[in-house]
């Protein structure tokens, strides 16, 4: 809402940065939006996101801080504030979905992984709804979530997409892009890009499972359920449980996701198929989670979260992710633990053999306690 | 600029679906053809740099490739939701609307 004012002709960046750091909230917004359009900051979205996060860091006591904006079908971001923390629900369903959805996503990361927001430091969660007209998409712009209304401007009989806030996992997906931007910083291209996408699907789906309190076997593992209209033959955009089966439709075509390395799709479109090949790590996560049973966010999610936070880097590929999740499982649950074996099995099912996760696990399993006992000589050495 | 044809392609996005449309201006209703011409003129399309993407795409944003053919030749511009200038938004929206009901690939 402040974006239409412009003070950039007069103020040099160092003064704007000062205002953005020390000003009132509306001064901060104005200064940041001005910095965003300045030549110096072009293309430096990571720097801007960190800066914005710093400017709006919720005080140490802070918890969840959400703001939903309305773009009113225009392309200006963020738009007009329509709901913030503490406000009563809006009459607009998209506004409430964005607000509630970012709240549940915050809760999963905070309650389960002890992560305070996107930047692990209380960053405010900003969402814009009603972006453009007929915008059949949602994205993370480096600082905030943006949602379109789908095909709202087509006749009902021609609509393919509903509004993008309709599925909770889409909201979790977009927010997780923010987490990845602050942690592994996976490049958005080729295999690192497909891992970036997969992390968003994994935690997007976990947000939904957490909300519904579903176990791994109860969950549908569909990404974007409810997004496709009844004119489309499909249950959603992707299936983590059975990649390649989410839709098969005369207009939309067929879900192109592979579930195995032998079917990896080489393409230049979609940044090297980041939304296609993510099916492979998605399926590895699904297999791991089902193998472990129970709530997927507890063990499988914890392992993937540690890999995202502490192990994966900008150029990591699928094999790296296999090795590093295996390593993380070993550290969290013990070398040779059932958890580590489940991770190994998950990647095996997609055609990847883990390596470099430390010593070969004993064939009879053996968790943390056993390993510790062995170490102090209280248990017999594992058979090799 | 006497535009004959526009090739529009949209890739990426949350769903990762590609849509494309090849538009002959003479096949469009006059009103639509005129507004496309006006938008291209306003943008000084032929003078735009070919690469108008940020260094890296932002997650789930669309990538747009627009090729405009005139008698003199053709010019292609690649841009995205977060990198397209405000002035280009109306053109993107219009081309998007024309391409959206096409079969995706």
Image (cartoon, coloured by chain):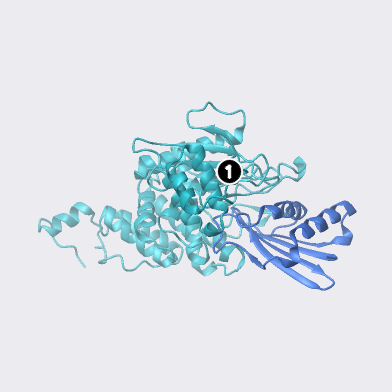
Chain colours: A cyan, B blue
Count of number-bearing discs = 1
In the image, residue A293 above or below residue B72 = above
* Subunit that carries the residue with mark 1: A
In the image, residue A205 above or below residue A354 = above
Q: Could one spot residue A129 in this view of the protein?
A: yes
Classify the position of the N terminus of chain A by image quarter.
top right
In the image, residue B100 above or below residue A318 = above
Q: Residue furthest front?
A: A10
Q: Residue at x 55, y 47 (%)?
A: A33
Disc 1: CA contacts within 10 A as few (<14), some (14-19) or many (>=20): many
Relative to the observer, which residue lies in front, A238 or A13?
Answer: A13
Residue B6: x percent and y percent? 79, 63
Residue A111: x percent and y percent? 36, 39
Residue where numbered disc 1 is placed: A78
Q: Could one spot residue A176 in this view of the protein?
A: no
Q: Quadrant of residue A379?
A: bottom left
Judging from the image, what secondary structure is the residue with disc 1 in?
A: loop
Classify the position of the C terminus of chain A by image quarter.
bottom left
Q: Residue at x 46, y 47 (%)?
A: A52
Residue A264: x percent and y percent? 54, 67
From the viewer's perspective, is A258 left or right of B40?
Answer: left
């Amino acid at each position: 809402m402040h974006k239409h004012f412009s003070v950039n002709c007069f103020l040099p960046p160092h003064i704007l940065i000062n205002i953005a750091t020390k000003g009132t909230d509306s001064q901060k917004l104005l200064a940041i939006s001005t910095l965003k359009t300045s030549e110096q900051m072009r293309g430096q979205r990571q720097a801007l996101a960190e800066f914005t996060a710093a400017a709006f860091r919720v005080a140490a006591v802070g918890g969840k801080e959400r703001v939903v904006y309305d773009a009113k079908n225009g392309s200006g971001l963020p738009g007009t504030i329509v709901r913030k923390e503490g406000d009563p629900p809006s009459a607009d369903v998209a506004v409430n979905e964005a607000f509630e959805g970012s709240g549940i996503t915050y809760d999963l990361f905070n309650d389960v992984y002890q992560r305070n927001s996107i930047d692990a430091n209380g960053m405010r969660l900003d969402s814009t709804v009603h972006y453009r007209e007929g915008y059949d998409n949602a994205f993370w712009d480096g600082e905030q979530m943006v949602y379109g209304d789908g095909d709202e401007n087509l006749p009902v009989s021609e609509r393919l997409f509903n509004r993008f806030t309709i599925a909770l996992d889409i909201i979790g997906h977009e927010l997780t892009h923010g987490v990845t931007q602050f942690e592994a910083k996976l490049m958005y291209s080729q295999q690192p890009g497909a891992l970036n996408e997969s992390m968003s699907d994994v935690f997007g789906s976990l947000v939904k499972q957490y909300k519904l309190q579903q176990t791994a076997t109860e969950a549908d593992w569909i990404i974007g359920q409810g997004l496709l209209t009844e004119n489309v033959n499909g249950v959603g955009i992707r299936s983590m449980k059975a990649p390649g089966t989410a839709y098969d439709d005369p207009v939309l075509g067929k879900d192109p996701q592979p579930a195995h390395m032998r079917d990896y799709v080489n393409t230049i479109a979609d940044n090297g198929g980041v939304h296609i090949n993510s099916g492979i790590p998605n399926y590895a996560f699904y297999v791991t989670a089902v193998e472990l049973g129970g709530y997927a966010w507890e063990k499988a999610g914890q392992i993937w979260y540690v890999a995202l936070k502490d192990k994966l880097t900008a150029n990591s590929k699928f094999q790296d992710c296999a090795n590093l999740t295996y390593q993380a499982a070993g550290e969290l649950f013990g070398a040779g633990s059932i958890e580590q074996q489940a991770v190994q099995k998950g990647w095996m099912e997609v055609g990847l053999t883990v390596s470099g996760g430390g010593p070969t696990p004993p064939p009879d399993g053996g968790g943390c306690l056993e390993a510790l006992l062995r170490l102090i000589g209280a248990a017999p050495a594992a058979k090799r | 600029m006497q535009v004959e044809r526009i090739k529009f392609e949209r890739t990426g996005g949350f769903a990762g679906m590609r849509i494309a449309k090849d538009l002959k201006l003479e096949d469009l209703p006059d009103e639509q053809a005129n507004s496309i011409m006006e938008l291209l003129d306003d943008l000084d399309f032929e003078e735009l740099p070919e690469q108008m993407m940020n260094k890296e795409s932002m997650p789930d944003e669309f990538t747009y490739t627009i090729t405009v053919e005139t008698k003199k030749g053709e010019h292609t511009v690649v841009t995205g939701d977060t990198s397209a200038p405000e002035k280009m938004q109306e053109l993107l929206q219009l081309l998007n609307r024309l391409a959206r009901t096409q079969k995706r690939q």
